[in-house]
């Protein structure tokens, strides 16, 4: 019945049938058939010699659940990836309540903070990962460069490690046991329609500028929406925060009060919950300024409509995701999962994600798979020397274009806050509901 | 007279139905009731026996405004579907004489139902939007000079979509009741000198009551529990009880959602009971 449901039912399944190769390989034929059909989960590993033709079930938030990755993985490693895309709430729910329904969880760090303590996942032994050292320091120490400041919120490194193999307690220092291997992350800001706005936008506070009355929107996912709201309130000087990623009840109340006033004054045209909604609101001109995600901006632009991912002086709200292992994985499947995760970091996927406007967790390995022009545009903030193509080969930007916000260091270096889950989460959600019902 | 054997055999005959109800209705409902007393944190639900969920729910002004809002949608939708449903049913039952044409018109009514109700709802969005078909047409015709903003992402849009989606639920039972009305009663009324309106008032409306009651129950229960129409047509700016429950489930707050569901269930049951007090459906059928 629901839209979300529709999205969650979109099963991005790749080849789950019996692979030809599996059959040809005489000895492993029977094995291949059985595993290839996805019928086997958690059997003892009698066939440990053959990692190929294992099927791993991965689920996550669509962002990195991309069929091309599954195809390439099959080609390079022989591992079948069965991908399911869900929205972030459903991901958290499934990771906790149906621990045997997945092998690999592709979740965001703030979801990890919620999910990992439930004990349905197992940490990864970093010594088994060849590409561990290539992972950006942002995920290890929280600092992009040795002298950068650690942003507020659930910064990935704070939930990136646990104390031991069977521990569910997050470690304060990097250990040998990683909860998620970072895969994808980005810095979010406001999207605007420069053709419908005739002044410079440079602050989060502009979202509530009465000039845009009835033409603004904010996303209605409480844990993310509250952060955007906090960025706005802080920029307006209405509220000061100790830590926007972990607000006190009083801070939450004040933030929501500001938002309710704005809503009652008719500032908002709509609230959006899914990617498509945000694209439609912007493209149809219902909204001219709103919280937005990078690929949504690209989607609006691809319709030939001007849309800018406006950098703001207060900085970005960042998010990051990673892949982790289900608790029940063992033996052959576990080996295959390690193999897959190492491959994920080895560059091809990173280049693919970079080309979509996200960032790879291991930039240096991704560089090898990108042209100089692509690297310059996406990572260095340089003007494109030739047309920039999407991974599917469509022209995204013409030669001469410069990425909104500039280089990797400029964008990821000015993160003000990470998506997070707060201690006062329950209170926050209640207040958020008040805002929606007001 | 019912002997012991026939009594036993009738118990036996209803047992499959009773079993189905027990497994698919009673047990899930009891589970919801039980869970509504549990505690929860960010990612777990904790078996417990606390009243906190209800205390917050009933003590919060948000709940009351959400219920008021939901009732507003239910009443408005009920009113408009009743007017439309009654008119359409009346036309079909009394003005269309041949059975063939009745079937043809009835089929026409159901055509929109061949597509998913989400599609039917979403198709309003480009039509009503700021730069949508309707606003463009009105501006081009010179009727308004600014696009009408209230058309979309407003209460108007929610009620419009609800009426559009659920009018048929009103048409069918009313039509069914009307078809059972003995035509000689209508003739007798006319012979006795009653005007068309008097016939409507004294014969058709009273005898259509069971259909009206059934249609009302359908429409009100569906609108009270709805969340997707409210979310999409209000642009996420209005809340309904269903939407609140859906949000809570999304945030893994199952006990809070269960408590909301129990309160909603009681509310809807009270409304249905009141409706059944007004019309004894069993007697009238």
Image (cartoon, coloured by chain):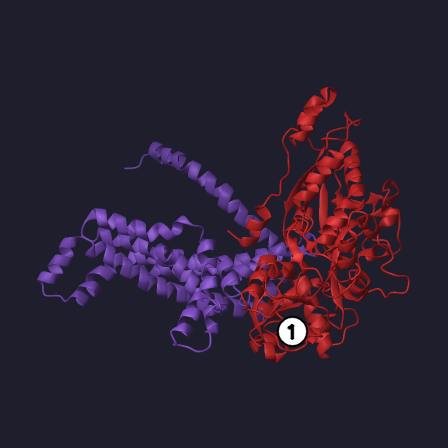
Quarter of the image where one finds residue B202:
bottom left
For the residue carrying disc 1, how many other residues have a C-alpha within 10 Å: few (<14), some (14-19), or many (20+)? many
Instruction: From the viewer's perspective, tell me whether residue A43 is left or right of residue B148.
Output: right
Residue closest to the far right: A146
Residue with the mark numbered 1: A207
Q: How many marks?
A: 1
Q: Which of the pair A201/A273 is nearer the observer?
A: A201
Q: Which of the pair B225/A139 is nearer the observer?
A: A139
Q: Which of the pair A2/B135 is nearer the observer?
A: B135
The spot of residue A95 in percent (x, y) is 69, 47
Q: Which of the pair B213/A180 is nearer the observer?
A: A180
Residue closest to the far top: A26
The spot of residue A304 in percent (x, y) is 58, 62
Residue A247 seen anywhere in this rendered image of the structure: yes
The spot of residue B262 in percent (x, y) is 53, 57
Residue A163 seen anywhere in this rendered image of the structure: no
Q: Chain of mark 1?
A: A
The spot of residue A275 in percent (x, y) is 61, 58
**SS assignment at label 1:** helix
Which chain is represented by red in the image?
Answer: A
Instruction: From the viewer's perspective, tell me whether residue A17 is left or right of residue B267.
Output: right
Quarter of the rendering occupied by the N terminus of chain B: top left
Q: Residue at x 80, y 56 (%)?
A: A156
Q: Colour of chain B?
A: purple
Q: Residue at x 63, y 31 (%)?
A: A17
**Is B56 above or below relative to A30?**
below
């Amino acid at each position: 019945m629901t839209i979300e449901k529709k999205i969650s039912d979109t099963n991005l399944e790749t080849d789950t049938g019996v692979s030809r190769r599996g059959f040809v390989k005489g000895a492993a034929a029977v094995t291949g058939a059985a595993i290839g059909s996805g019928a086997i989960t958690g059997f003892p590993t009698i066939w440990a010699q053959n990692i190929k033709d294992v099927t791993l079930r991965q689920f996550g938030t669509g962002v990195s659940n991309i069929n091309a990755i599954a195809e390439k993985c099959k080609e390079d490693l022989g591992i079948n990836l069965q991908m399911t895309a869900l929205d972030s709430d459903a991901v958290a729910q499934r990771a906790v309540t149906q621990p045997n329904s997945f092998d690999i969880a592709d979740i965001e760090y703030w979801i990890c903070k919620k999910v990992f303590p439930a004990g349905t996942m197992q940490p990864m032994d970093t010594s088994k990962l060849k590409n561990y050292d290539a992972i950006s320091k942002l995920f290890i120490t929280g600092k992009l460069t040795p002298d950068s400041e650690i942003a507020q919120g659930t910064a990935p490194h704070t939930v990136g490690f646990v104390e031991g193999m069977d521990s569910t307690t997050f470690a304060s220092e990097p250990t040998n046991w990683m909860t998620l291997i970072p895969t994808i992350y980005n810095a979010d800001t406001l999207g605007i329609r420069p053709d419908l706005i005739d002044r410079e936008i440079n602050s989060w506070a502009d979202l509530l500028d009465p000039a845009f009355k009835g033409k603004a929107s904010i996303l209605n996912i409480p844990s993310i929406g509250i952060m955007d709201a906090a960025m706005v309130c802080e920029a307006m000087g209405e509220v000061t925060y100790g830590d926007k990623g972990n607000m006190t009840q009083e801070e939450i109340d004040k933030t929501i009060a500001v938002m309710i006033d704005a809503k009652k004054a008719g500032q908002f045209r709509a609230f959006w919950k899914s990617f498509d909604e945000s694209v439609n609101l912007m493209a149809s001109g219902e909204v001219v300024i709103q919280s937005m995600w990078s690929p949504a901006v690209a989607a609006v632009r691809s319709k030939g409509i001007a849309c800018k991912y406006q950098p703001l002086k207060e900085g970005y709200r960042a998010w990051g995701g990673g892949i982790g292992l289900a608790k029940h994985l063992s033996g052959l499947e576990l080996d295959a999962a390690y193999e897959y995760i190492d491959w994920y970091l080895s560059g091809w996927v990173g280049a693919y994600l970079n080309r979509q406007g996200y960032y790879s967790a291991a930039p240096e390995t991704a560089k090898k798979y990108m042209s100089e022009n692509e690297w310059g545009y996406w990572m260095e903030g340089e003007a494109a020397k030739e047309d920039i193509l999407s991974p599917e080969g469509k022209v995204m930007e013409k030669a001469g274009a410069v990425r909104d916000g500039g280089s990797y260091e400029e964008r990821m270096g000015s993160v003000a806050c990470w998506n997070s889950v707060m201690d006062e989460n329950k209170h926050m959600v209640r207040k958020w509901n008040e805002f929606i019902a007001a | 007279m019912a002997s012991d054997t026939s009594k036993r055999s009738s118990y036996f005959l209803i047992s499959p139905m009773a079993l189905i109800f027990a497994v698919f209705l009673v047990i899930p409902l009891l589970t919801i009731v039980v869970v509504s007393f549990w505690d929860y944190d960010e990612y777990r639900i904790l078996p417990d026996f606390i009243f906190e969920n209800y205390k917050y729910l009933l003590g919060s002004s948000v709940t009351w405004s959400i219920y008021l809002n939901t009732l507003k949608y239910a009443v408005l939708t009920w009113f408009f579907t009743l007017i439309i449903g009654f008119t359409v049913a009346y036309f079909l039952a009394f003005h269309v004489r041949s059975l063939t044409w009745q079937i043809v018109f009835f089929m026409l009514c159901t055509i929109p139902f061949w597509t998913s109700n989400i599609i039917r709802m979403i198709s309003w969005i480009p039509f009503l939007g700021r730069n949508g078909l309707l606003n463009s047409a009105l501006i081009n015709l010179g009727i308004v000079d600014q696009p009408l903003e209230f058309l979309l992402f407003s209460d108007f849009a929610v009620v419009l979509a609800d009426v559009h989606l659920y009018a048929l639920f009103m048409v069918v039972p009313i039509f069914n009741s009307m078809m059972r009305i003995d035509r000689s009663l209508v003739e007798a009324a006319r012979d006795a000198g009653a005007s068309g309106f008097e016939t409507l008032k004294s014969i058709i409306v009273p005898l259509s009551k069971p259909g009206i009651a059934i249609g009302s129950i359908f429409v009100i229960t569906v609108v009270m529990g709805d969340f997707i129409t409210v979310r999409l047509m209000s642009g996420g700016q209005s809340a309904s009880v269903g939407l609140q429950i859906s949000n809570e489930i999304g945030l893994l707050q199952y006990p809070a959602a269960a408590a909301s569901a129990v309160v909603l269930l009681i509310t809807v049951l009270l409304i249905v009971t009141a409706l059944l007090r007004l019309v004894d459906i069993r007697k009238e059928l």
